[in-house]
Amino acid sequence: MQTLRILLNVGPHGLAEPVRRLLREACGDATVTETTEATSLDRFDGRQTDVLVTEDIPRNLSAWPRLRFVQLFSAGSNHLANHPVWSSDIAVANSSGTHGVPIAQYVTCAVLMLAHRMPQLIEVKRSRQWRPEGLDAAVVRGQTLGILGYGSIGRECARQLNALGMRIVCLKRDPARRHDDGFNAWPGTGDPEGKIPERWFGPDQLREMLPLCDVLVVAAAATPATLGLVGTTALALLKSGAHLIIVSRGGIVEEKALAEALRSGHLGGAAVDCFVQEPLPRDHVFFETPNLILTPHMSGVHQDFWPTMAALLRENLRRSRAGEPVLNRTDGRLGY
Protein backbone atom coordinates (compact mmCIF):
# COMPACT_ATOMS: atom_id res chain seq x y z
CA MET A 1 0.00 0.00 0.00
CA GLN A 2 1.32 3.43 -0.93
CA THR A 3 2.39 5.60 2.02
CA LEU A 4 -0.08 8.37 2.80
CA ARG A 5 1.41 11.83 2.37
CA ILE A 6 0.05 14.49 4.73
CA LEU A 7 0.73 18.21 4.63
CA LEU A 8 0.34 19.89 8.02
CA ASN A 9 -0.17 23.63 7.64
CA VAL A 10 0.93 24.92 11.04
CA GLY A 11 0.37 28.61 10.24
CA PRO A 12 2.83 31.51 10.08
CA HIS A 13 3.68 31.35 13.78
CA GLY A 14 4.06 27.59 13.95
CA LEU A 15 2.83 25.36 16.74
CA ALA A 16 4.35 24.49 20.09
CA GLU A 17 6.43 21.31 20.01
CA PRO A 18 4.00 19.28 22.19
CA VAL A 19 1.17 20.17 19.79
CA ARG A 20 3.21 19.28 16.73
CA ARG A 21 4.09 15.97 18.34
CA LEU A 22 0.41 15.25 19.10
CA LEU A 23 -0.63 15.91 15.52
CA ARG A 24 2.25 13.90 14.07
CA GLU A 25 1.40 10.95 16.32
CA ALA A 26 -2.20 11.16 15.11
CA CYS A 27 -0.92 10.75 11.56
CA GLY A 28 0.51 7.31 12.37
CA ASP A 29 2.97 5.95 9.82
CA ALA A 30 2.08 8.55 7.16
CA THR A 31 4.75 10.79 5.69
CA VAL A 32 4.16 14.23 7.23
CA THR A 33 5.43 17.52 5.80
CA GLU A 34 4.94 20.87 7.52
CA THR A 35 4.45 24.32 6.04
CA THR A 36 3.85 27.77 7.50
CA GLU A 37 2.08 29.11 4.38
CA ALA A 38 -1.12 29.86 6.27
CA THR A 39 -2.92 31.76 3.53
CA SER A 40 -0.65 31.15 0.54
CA LEU A 41 -0.98 27.44 -0.13
CA ASP A 42 -1.34 28.11 -3.85
CA ARG A 43 2.41 28.81 -3.80
CA PHE A 44 3.09 25.37 -2.31
CA ASP A 45 3.91 22.33 -4.44
CA GLY A 46 0.94 20.13 -3.61
CA ARG A 47 1.45 17.43 -6.25
CA GLN A 48 2.42 14.78 -3.70
CA THR A 49 -0.15 15.61 -1.01
CA ASP A 50 -2.98 13.19 -0.22
CA VAL A 51 -4.31 14.85 2.92
CA LEU A 52 -4.16 18.49 3.99
CA VAL A 53 -4.56 19.52 7.66
CA THR A 54 -5.12 23.25 7.70
CA GLU A 55 -7.33 26.28 8.28
CA ASP A 56 -7.31 27.38 4.63
CA ILE A 57 -7.43 25.50 1.34
CA PRO A 58 -5.64 26.34 -1.94
CA ARG A 59 -7.90 27.54 -4.74
CA ASN A 60 -5.90 26.07 -7.61
CA LEU A 61 -6.87 22.46 -6.95
CA SER A 62 -5.48 21.29 -10.28
CA ALA A 63 -2.04 21.71 -8.69
CA TRP A 64 -3.06 19.18 -6.00
CA PRO A 65 -4.04 16.14 -8.10
CA ARG A 66 -3.72 13.59 -5.26
CA LEU A 67 -5.59 15.57 -2.62
CA ARG A 68 -8.58 13.59 -1.37
CA PHE A 69 -9.24 14.84 2.14
CA VAL A 70 -8.91 18.13 4.04
CA GLN A 71 -9.19 18.33 7.82
CA LEU A 72 -9.93 21.85 9.06
CA PHE A 73 -8.80 23.09 12.46
CA SER A 74 -11.94 25.24 12.69
CA ALA A 75 -15.51 24.23 13.45
CA GLY A 76 -16.81 26.87 11.04
CA SER A 77 -16.24 26.76 7.30
CA ASN A 78 -17.88 30.03 6.25
CA HIS A 79 -14.43 31.33 5.25
CA LEU A 80 -14.62 28.89 2.32
CA ALA A 81 -17.66 30.56 0.74
CA ASN A 82 -17.56 30.17 -3.07
CA HIS A 83 -14.40 28.06 -2.84
CA PRO A 84 -13.86 25.62 -5.76
CA VAL A 85 -13.34 22.76 -3.29
CA TRP A 86 -17.12 22.61 -2.89
CA SER A 87 -17.54 21.48 -6.49
CA SER A 88 -14.80 18.85 -6.25
CA ASP A 89 -14.74 15.30 -4.89
CA ILE A 90 -12.38 16.30 -2.07
CA ALA A 91 -13.88 15.62 1.39
CA VAL A 92 -13.61 18.61 3.73
CA ALA A 93 -14.20 17.95 7.44
CA ASN A 94 -14.53 20.63 10.12
CA SER A 95 -13.57 20.29 13.78
CA SER A 96 -17.10 20.21 15.17
CA GLY A 97 -17.23 18.26 18.43
CA THR A 98 -13.92 19.58 19.72
CA HIS A 99 -15.52 22.67 21.29
CA GLY A 100 -18.94 21.49 22.49
CA VAL A 101 -18.35 21.17 26.22
CA PRO A 102 -16.32 24.37 26.80
CA ILE A 103 -18.65 26.53 24.69
CA ALA A 104 -21.65 25.07 26.49
CA GLN A 105 -19.90 25.86 29.80
CA TYR A 106 -19.55 29.46 28.58
CA VAL A 107 -23.27 29.52 27.75
CA THR A 108 -24.23 28.06 31.12
CA CYS A 109 -21.98 30.61 32.82
CA ALA A 110 -23.56 33.45 30.82
CA VAL A 111 -27.10 32.24 31.58
CA LEU A 112 -26.34 32.22 35.31
CA MET A 113 -24.40 35.50 35.28
CA LEU A 114 -27.31 37.26 33.60
CA ALA A 115 -29.86 35.58 35.88
CA HIS A 116 -27.92 36.65 38.97
CA ARG A 117 -27.09 40.12 37.60
CA MET A 118 -23.37 39.48 38.03
CA PRO A 119 -22.23 42.35 35.74
CA GLN A 120 -24.07 44.77 38.06
CA LEU A 121 -22.97 42.98 41.23
CA ILE A 122 -19.33 43.17 40.18
CA GLU A 123 -19.69 46.96 40.30
CA VAL A 124 -20.29 46.82 44.07
CA LYS A 125 -16.60 46.25 44.67
CA ARG A 126 -15.44 48.81 42.11
CA SER A 127 -17.80 51.53 43.33
CA ARG A 128 -17.58 50.67 47.06
CA GLN A 129 -21.34 51.35 47.18
CA TRP A 130 -23.59 48.91 49.10
CA ARG A 131 -26.71 48.98 46.91
CA PRO A 132 -28.58 45.66 46.82
CA GLU A 133 -31.84 47.19 45.58
CA GLY A 134 -33.01 45.96 42.19
CA LEU A 135 -30.40 43.19 42.02
CA ASP A 136 -32.65 40.24 42.78
CA ALA A 137 -31.91 37.09 40.80
CA ALA A 138 -34.13 35.27 38.33
CA VAL A 139 -34.73 31.54 38.81
CA VAL A 140 -33.84 29.73 35.59
CA ARG A 141 -35.57 26.52 36.61
CA GLY A 142 -38.80 26.37 34.62
CA GLN A 143 -37.64 28.96 32.08
CA THR A 144 -37.54 28.13 28.37
CA LEU A 145 -34.21 28.04 26.55
CA GLY A 146 -34.40 28.34 22.76
CA ILE A 147 -31.41 27.08 20.81
CA LEU A 148 -30.88 28.34 17.27
CA GLY A 149 -28.73 25.64 15.66
CA TYR A 150 -28.83 22.18 17.21
CA GLY A 151 -25.39 20.78 16.39
CA SER A 152 -22.75 19.53 18.81
CA ILE A 153 -22.61 22.85 20.69
CA GLY A 154 -26.35 23.36 20.87
CA ARG A 155 -26.89 19.81 22.09
CA GLU A 156 -24.42 20.15 24.95
CA CYS A 157 -25.98 23.51 25.89
CA ALA A 158 -29.30 21.68 26.05
CA ARG A 159 -27.89 18.91 28.27
CA GLN A 160 -26.24 21.27 30.75
CA LEU A 161 -29.12 23.73 31.05
CA ASN A 162 -31.82 21.08 31.05
CA ALA A 163 -30.01 19.71 34.12
CA LEU A 164 -30.73 23.09 35.76
CA GLY A 165 -34.42 22.59 35.07
CA MET A 166 -34.78 24.67 31.91
CA ARG A 167 -37.22 23.60 29.22
CA ILE A 168 -35.48 23.23 25.85
CA VAL A 169 -36.82 24.11 22.40
CA CYS A 170 -34.66 24.24 19.31
CA LEU A 171 -34.59 25.32 15.68
CA LYS A 172 -32.69 23.21 13.16
CA ARG A 173 -32.33 23.29 9.38
CA ASP A 174 -33.80 19.79 9.17
CA PRO A 175 -35.81 19.15 12.36
CA ALA A 176 -36.85 15.71 11.15
CA ARG A 177 -33.18 14.62 11.37
CA ARG A 178 -32.76 14.46 15.13
CA HIS A 179 -29.79 12.11 15.50
CA ASP A 180 -26.26 13.54 15.54
CA ASP A 181 -23.52 11.25 14.23
CA GLY A 182 -20.69 13.80 14.25
CA PHE A 183 -17.49 13.70 16.28
CA ASN A 184 -17.76 14.19 20.04
CA ALA A 185 -14.59 14.48 22.09
CA TRP A 186 -16.52 13.93 25.33
CA PRO A 187 -18.55 10.68 25.20
CA GLY A 188 -21.68 10.84 27.30
CA THR A 189 -22.22 14.55 26.67
CA GLY A 190 -24.52 16.37 24.27
CA ASP A 191 -27.79 14.95 23.03
CA PRO A 192 -26.83 12.57 20.19
CA GLU A 193 -30.29 11.02 19.93
CA GLY A 194 -32.17 14.32 20.13
CA LYS A 195 -34.22 13.41 23.20
CA ILE A 196 -33.96 16.65 25.20
CA PRO A 197 -35.93 19.33 23.28
CA GLU A 198 -39.64 19.49 24.04
CA ARG A 199 -40.31 21.10 20.67
CA TRP A 200 -38.44 21.22 17.37
CA PHE A 201 -38.78 24.00 14.81
CA GLY A 202 -37.65 24.39 11.21
CA PRO A 203 -36.11 27.51 9.58
CA ASP A 204 -39.53 28.85 8.54
CA GLN A 205 -40.81 28.60 12.13
CA LEU A 206 -38.50 31.10 13.83
CA ARG A 207 -41.42 33.45 14.50
CA GLU A 208 -43.18 30.63 16.34
CA MET A 209 -40.21 29.72 18.54
CA LEU A 210 -38.99 33.15 19.64
CA PRO A 211 -42.03 34.15 21.77
CA LEU A 212 -41.49 31.02 23.88
CA CYS A 213 -37.93 31.94 24.85
CA ASP A 214 -36.75 33.37 28.13
CA VAL A 215 -33.22 32.81 26.83
CA LEU A 216 -32.11 32.45 23.21
CA VAL A 217 -28.75 30.85 22.38
CA VAL A 218 -27.43 31.41 18.86
CA ALA A 219 -25.23 28.45 17.91
CA ALA A 220 -26.03 28.12 14.19
CA ALA A 221 -23.51 28.01 11.37
CA ALA A 222 -22.99 31.24 9.45
CA THR A 223 -24.41 30.66 5.97
CA PRO A 224 -26.26 32.81 3.43
CA ALA A 225 -29.47 31.43 4.95
CA THR A 226 -28.63 32.48 8.53
CA LEU A 227 -26.86 35.83 8.09
CA GLY A 228 -29.15 38.60 9.31
CA LEU A 229 -31.69 36.03 10.47
CA VAL A 230 -32.24 37.73 13.84
CA GLY A 231 -32.93 41.43 13.32
CA THR A 232 -35.23 44.04 14.78
CA THR A 233 -38.43 42.15 13.97
CA ALA A 234 -37.17 38.84 15.36
CA LEU A 235 -35.79 40.41 18.54
CA ALA A 236 -39.14 42.07 19.18
CA LEU A 237 -40.75 38.61 19.26
CA LEU A 238 -38.67 37.52 22.25
CA LYS A 239 -40.25 37.83 25.68
CA SER A 240 -39.81 41.18 27.38
CA GLY A 241 -36.70 40.95 29.54
CA ALA A 242 -35.36 37.89 27.67
CA HIS A 243 -31.63 37.18 27.46
CA LEU A 244 -29.63 36.47 24.30
CA ILE A 245 -26.30 34.61 24.04
CA ILE A 246 -24.27 34.42 20.82
CA VAL A 247 -21.52 31.79 20.45
CA SER A 248 -21.54 31.01 16.73
CA ARG A 249 -20.42 33.60 14.16
CA GLY A 250 -21.04 37.32 13.82
CA GLY A 251 -23.78 38.55 11.53
CA ILE A 252 -26.53 36.06 12.36
CA VAL A 253 -27.86 38.58 14.87
CA GLU A 254 -27.87 42.16 13.58
CA GLU A 255 -25.58 44.01 15.96
CA LYS A 256 -27.25 47.44 15.81
CA ALA A 257 -30.66 45.86 16.34
CA LEU A 258 -29.36 43.98 19.40
CA ALA A 259 -27.83 47.14 20.85
CA GLU A 260 -31.13 48.97 20.44
CA ALA A 261 -33.15 46.12 22.01
CA LEU A 262 -30.85 46.28 25.06
CA ARG A 263 -30.94 50.09 25.28
CA SER A 264 -34.73 50.12 25.07
CA GLY A 265 -35.00 47.53 27.85
CA HIS A 266 -36.91 45.03 25.72
CA LEU A 267 -34.06 42.57 26.26
CA GLY A 268 -32.83 42.19 29.81
CA GLY A 269 -29.28 41.23 28.93
CA ALA A 270 -26.98 39.57 26.42
CA ALA A 271 -23.61 37.87 26.16
CA VAL A 272 -21.83 38.16 22.81
CA ASP A 273 -18.66 36.28 21.88
CA CYS A 274 -18.68 36.59 18.05
CA PHE A 275 -18.82 39.70 15.89
CA VAL A 276 -19.06 40.81 12.26
CA GLN A 277 -15.67 42.50 12.49
CA GLU A 278 -12.92 41.06 14.66
CA PRO A 279 -11.08 42.50 16.51
CA LEU A 280 -14.01 44.68 17.46
CA PRO A 281 -13.41 48.36 16.52
CA ARG A 282 -12.91 50.57 19.57
CA ASP A 283 -15.84 52.76 18.52
CA HIS A 284 -18.27 49.84 18.18
CA VAL A 285 -21.75 50.45 19.58
CA PHE A 286 -21.46 47.43 21.90
CA PHE A 287 -18.89 49.15 24.12
CA GLU A 288 -21.57 51.65 25.17
CA THR A 289 -24.48 49.18 25.27
CA PRO A 290 -25.96 48.43 28.72
CA ASN A 291 -26.51 44.94 30.14
CA LEU A 292 -24.10 43.38 27.65
CA ILE A 293 -21.32 40.91 28.47
CA LEU A 294 -18.73 41.19 25.69
CA THR A 295 -15.92 38.64 25.21
CA PRO A 296 -13.24 38.44 22.47
CA HIS A 297 -14.37 35.29 20.59
CA MET A 298 -12.89 32.93 23.15
CA SER A 299 -15.80 30.76 24.29
CA GLY A 300 -14.31 27.79 22.42
CA VAL A 301 -10.71 28.33 23.50
CA HIS A 302 -9.80 25.58 25.94
CA GLN A 303 -6.75 23.79 27.26
CA ASP A 304 -7.68 20.41 25.76
CA PHE A 305 -8.28 21.59 22.19
CA TRP A 306 -5.20 20.02 20.61
CA PRO A 307 -5.64 16.57 22.18
CA THR A 308 -9.26 16.54 21.02
CA MET A 309 -8.22 17.80 17.58
CA ALA A 310 -5.63 15.03 17.37
CA ALA A 311 -8.26 12.43 18.26
CA LEU A 312 -10.54 13.68 15.46
CA LEU A 313 -7.67 13.72 12.98
CA ARG A 314 -6.64 10.19 13.92
CA GLU A 315 -10.16 8.84 13.43
CA ASN A 316 -10.72 10.66 10.15
CA LEU A 317 -7.40 9.46 8.75
CA ARG A 318 -8.39 5.92 9.66
CA ARG A 319 -11.69 6.38 7.89
CA SER A 320 -10.07 7.95 4.86
CA ARG A 321 -7.64 5.05 4.54
CA ALA A 322 -10.46 2.53 4.89
CA GLY A 323 -12.66 4.27 2.34
CA GLU A 324 -15.25 5.13 5.01
CA PRO A 325 -17.08 8.49 5.26
CA VAL A 326 -15.12 10.93 7.40
CA LEU A 327 -16.73 12.54 10.42
CA ASN A 328 -17.94 16.16 10.15
CA ARG A 329 -17.89 16.27 6.35
CA THR A 330 -19.07 19.69 5.21
CA ASP A 331 -21.52 20.35 2.41
CA GLY A 332 -20.84 23.19 -0.02
CA ARG A 333 -24.51 23.47 -0.95
CA LEU A 334 -25.34 24.29 2.66
CA GLY A 335 -22.20 26.30 3.40
CA TYR A 336 -21.17 24.25 6.43
Image: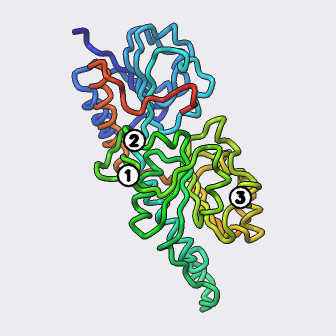
Residue 235 is marked as 3
Q: Is residue 278 left or right of residue 192?
A: right
Note whether 42 is above or below 245 in the view shown: above
- Identified by mark 1, the residue type is Gly
Q: Earlier in the sequence, mark 3 or mark 1?
A: 1
Coloration of the structure image: rainbow
How far, Cα to Cα, is label 3 from label 1?
27 Å
Instruction: Report the mark closest to the observer, 1 or 2.
Output: 2
> Mark 1: which secondary structure?
loop
Q: Position of residue 170 (x, y in %)?
A: 53, 53
- Identified by mark 2, the residue type is Asp
Foreground residue among 91 and 51: 91
How far, Cα to Cα, is label 1 from label 2?
9 Å
Q: Is residue 133 left or right of residue 234?
A: left
Location of residue 53 (image quadrant): top left
Q: Are marks 1 and 2 in contact (CB under 8 Å)?
A: yes
Q: Position of residue 131 (x, y in %)?
A: 62, 90
Q: Earlier in the sequence, mark 1 or mark 2?
A: 2
The residue beneath circle 2 is 180
The residue beneath circle 1 is 190
Residue at image position (29%, 15%) is: 4
Whether residue 23 is visible here, answered yes or no, is yes
Note whether 159 is above or below 240 in the view shown: above
Callout 1 environment at 10 Å: few (<14), some (14 to 19), or many (20+)? many
Callout 3 environment at 10 Å: few (<14), some (14 to 19), or many (20+)? many
Q: Position of residue 219 (x, y in %)?
A: 54, 49
- Identified by mark 3, the residue type is Leu
Task: Name the quadrant of the N terminus.
Answer: top left
Q: Is residue 249 left or right of residue 240?
A: left
Location of residue 236 (image quadrant): bottom right
